[in-house]
Image (cartoon, rainbow, N blue to C red):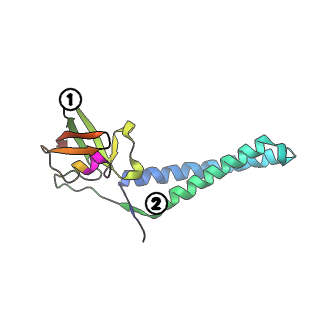
Amino acid sequence: MVYFQKMTPEGYQEIKDEIARLKQDRPRRVKILQAARALGDLSENTEYSEAKRDLGHLDSRLRYLDKQLKYAEIVETNEDGLVDLGKLVSLKFEDDDETEEYKIVGRMEADLSKGKISFDSPLGQAIMKQKAGSTVTVEAPAGNYQVTIVAIN
C-alpha cells in the first residue's frame, strides 16, 4: 500500500528548493572527499572519514527528499470557510487573552517556530473542518484544553 503525504504547494516547493541546494553543494563535497583521499593512508585519515560521512549524509538526505516528493499529495486550498490545509487560522486558547496565528500544513512541513502546525497534530485534528467562531476541545498528551477559532484566512 502506498501512503501519500499531504502537502501544501509551498511545502512541495520548499523541498524542491532544498534538493536543488543539496545538488549544487554535492560537487564541492565530492572534491573535498577526493582531496582527503589524496592525503594517503585511509585507515588513519580523519579528513577522509569526515568527508565520506558528510557526502553520505547529503546523499541520504537527497534520497529522502526525493521520496517525499514522489509520494506527495499536493492539496490546494479552497474558499469554503473551513479550516483546512494551507489556511492561516487565528486561534484563542482558553485562559489566554491573545490570539495566535498558525498555518495548517502537512506533516513534513510542520514547524512550530515558524507558526506551522500539522493537520494531524492534536491541535490540527481538533480544528480541521471547523468554522470561525467554533470552540473545540484539543485532546493532547499533556491534557485536554479548549481553543476558539477566531478567523480563517
Q: Spatial distance from mark 1 to mark 2, Cα to Cα?
A: 39 Å
Q: Which mark is residue 139?
A: none
Q: Position of residue 123 (x, y in %)?
A: 27, 45
Which residues lie in the magenta part?
A: 119-125
In the image, farthest residue toward the bottom: 1
- Left/right placement of residue 94 relative to residue 1 reads left
> Which of 29 and 55 lies nearest the eye of the viewer?
55
Amino acid carrying mark 1 in the image = Asp
- Measured from the top left, where is residue 51 in percent x and y? 72, 45
Residue 96: image tag: 1
Neighbours of disc 2 within 10 Å: few (<14), some (14-19), many (20+) = some
Using the rendered image of the protein, determine whether residue 65 is visible from the camera's viewpoint. yes
Viewed as shown, does residue 150 lie left or right of 38? left
For disc 1, the neighbor class at 10 Å (few under 14, some 14 to 19, many from 20) is: few
Which residue was labeled with disc 2?
Answer: 69
- Which of the image's four quarters has the C terminus? top left
Residue 151 falls in image quadrant: top left
